[in-house]
Amino acid sequence: MTSLAASGPGSLRAALAQTGKRIVVFEVGGVINLAGRSLEVAEPFVTVAGETAPSPGIIIIRGGISIRTHDVRISHIAVRPGTNDQPALSGWEPDGVGISRAKARDVHIDHVSTSWAVDENMSASGERYEGPAATSGRITFSNSIIAEALDYATHKKGKHSKGILIHDYVQDVAVVGNLFAHNDRRNPYFKAHATGVVVNNLMYNPGNAAVQLGYIDHEWEGRERQPGNPQVAVVGNQLIYGRDTYSDLALVAYQGDVYLSDNQVLNLDGGDMAQVQGDIKLLKNAPVWPQGLQPLALTKTYEHVLTHAGSRPWERDQVDQRIVDSVRRKTGRIIDSQDEVGGYPDYPAVRRPLEVPANSDEVAGWLLSFVPKAYR
């Protein structure tokens, strides 16, 4: 990619529209202003390697990314939709990263920073009334910063600060090693029949919900299929209250089947709080578990996440650094607009030529070379 334009030759949009197996690398770093027109990933077998961009990396504003296909990996970019100068309740409702429809499978979102989304910072969904085959699935959200989802902004429903939504029937989702900060709800939220794991995440200053489980009964009225409990393993997570956190918030709440192990909930005074609240059935074993996943001990979660999460943890931009600092200092809050925290970033374009290996066997190692070992 050689252009920061929203479209046209050398742009990210043009690269995503190409067909066939491909890796998107960047000879330019800076801000991509989508001006209200989100990116769509509809062609499979694509890796977006944001780590190859020169500092400050790739920051997408005024729109998000919609993934509607399979075999997709996106890493080391920031997505900050914001209100796009639209009025309150206007219906401007972008996700930061939204994964949807039956073809959207085998998707990995890794080291991505999402903030200021109006619907969800991240989501996985599909034709939820038609069963798991009609929805997205086999999705991993890892090592990312999911923060400051806008609350009373441009969503037509009004207050809507949400972290990650795993919609009805979306299955085999891994939420691993992420920082959730200053999102009111859905940190994350698994709905009817959804399955997955929530492992080694750090959750700071949620408002009314951390890990939500359950479904909305009236959404299923008149449907052939009926809702059932989500089934989730919740392992090695730490929840820390902030100024906006409900005074008795539990780690897992509402309705669902859960395997719990090695988690902690701390209130404003550092005291332990309840881990479960509501109609929660405790399981003796994890209902699903990704092959090869080895959780860290709870004692390592806090530092590991604050060190490794986000688009460029080795050289964080001002937004990510401020969010990480707010966790360490126990400051920050749920916001309604990006303007409350400095507004959209405005970095000049930075260019650097790349020498891509001619031998395809060398590409994986070449990509790793852009990320210091301490931050992988």
Image: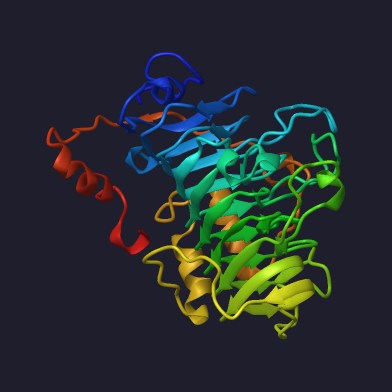
Position of 118 relative to 145 (above/below): above
Q: In the rendered view, how is the structure colored?
A: rainbow
At which x and y percent is residue 311?
A: 46, 48
Q: Quadrant of residue 233?
A: bottom right
At which x and y percent is residue 239?
A: 66, 72
Of residue 311 and residue 93, the one placed in the foreground of this image is 93
Position of 284 relative to 249 (above/below): below
At which x and y percent is residue 90?
A: 83, 28
Of residue 327 and residue 49, the one placed in the foreground of this image is 49
Position of 242 relative to 89 (above/below): below
Q: Quadrant of residue 194?
A: bottom right
Instruction: Point out the image quarter for the C terminus.
Output: bottom left
Does residue 265 show up? Answer: yes
Q: Is residue 283 left or right of residue 58?
A: right
Of residue 326 and residue 196, the one placed in the foreground of this image is 196
- Residue closest to the far front: 224
At which x and y percent is residue 165?
A: 66, 50
Does residue 97 show up? Answer: no
Residue at 35% over, 26% down = 1
Residue at 37% over, 34% down = 46
- Residue closest to the far top: 8
